[in-house]
């Protein structure tokens, strides 16, 4: 198992930072275990399997997932200089979280 400092994946770094800020380290480990056990989703696969990540997050957090998704998208866009319009498109409901993240990753 890789620690957060060993994992250089930018999507994972943003996800980890947001989840840790919102829930704390212990709860984040539970979230990761849920994603691994229920969806066979490893931390280094978040970027490649963003749809599955979103599904797992929504399954676990229900209505609260949208807040976390907006924070992840905003932090990613701010960190990698992608267009601010992307976040507005996501928030307007034009694109779901996974689609918005794929677009942001392509522009980064």
Image (spheres, helix red, strand yellow):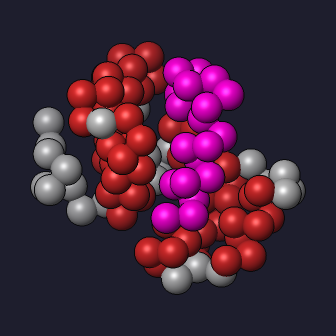
Residue 7 seen in the current view: yes
Residue 102: x and y, percent?
61, 60
Using the rendered view, name the quadrant where residue 58 is placed.
top right
**Chain part drawn in magenta:** 55-75
Q: Is residue 13 above or below residue 23?
A: below
In magenta segment, residue 83: no
Q: Is residue 102 left or right of residue 76?
A: right
Residue name at image x 34 percent, y 53 percent: 17
Using the rendered view, name the quadrant where residue 99 is placed.
bottom right
Residue name at image x 42 percent, y 41 percent: 22
Q: How many marks?
A: 0
Residue name at image x 84 percent, y 52 percent: 93
Residue 66: x and y, percent?
65, 40
As drawn, the residue found furthest toward the top would be: 38
Q: Is residue 3 left or right of residue 25?
A: left
Q: Is residue 63 above or below residue 83?
A: above
Q: Is residue 91 above or below residue 24?
A: below
Query: Along the line of sight, which residue is nearer the eye, 12 or 91?
Result: 91
- How would you classify the magenta stretch by its main secondary structure? helix
Residue 46: x and y, percent?
43, 46
Residue 7: x and y, percent?
21, 55
In magenta segment, residue 74: yes
Using the rendered view, name the quadrant where residue 35 is placed.
top left
Q: Quadrant of the N terminus?
A: top left
Residue name at image x 46 percent, y 53 percent: 47
Residue 36 seen in the current view: no
């Amino acid at each position: 198992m890789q620690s957060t400092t060993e994992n250089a994946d930018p999507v994972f770094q943003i996800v980890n930072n947001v989840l840790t800020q919102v829930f704390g380290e212990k709860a984040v480990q539970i979230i990761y275990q849920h994603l691994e056990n229920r969806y066979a989703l490893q931390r280094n696969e978040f970027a490649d399997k963003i749809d599955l990540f979103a599904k797992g997050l929504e399954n676990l957090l229900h209505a609260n997932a949208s807040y976390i998704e907006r924070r992840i998208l905003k932090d990613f866009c701010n960190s990698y200089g992608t267009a601010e319009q992307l976040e507005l498109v996501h928030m307007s409901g034009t694109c779901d979280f996974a689609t918005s993240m794929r677009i942001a990753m392509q522009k980064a």
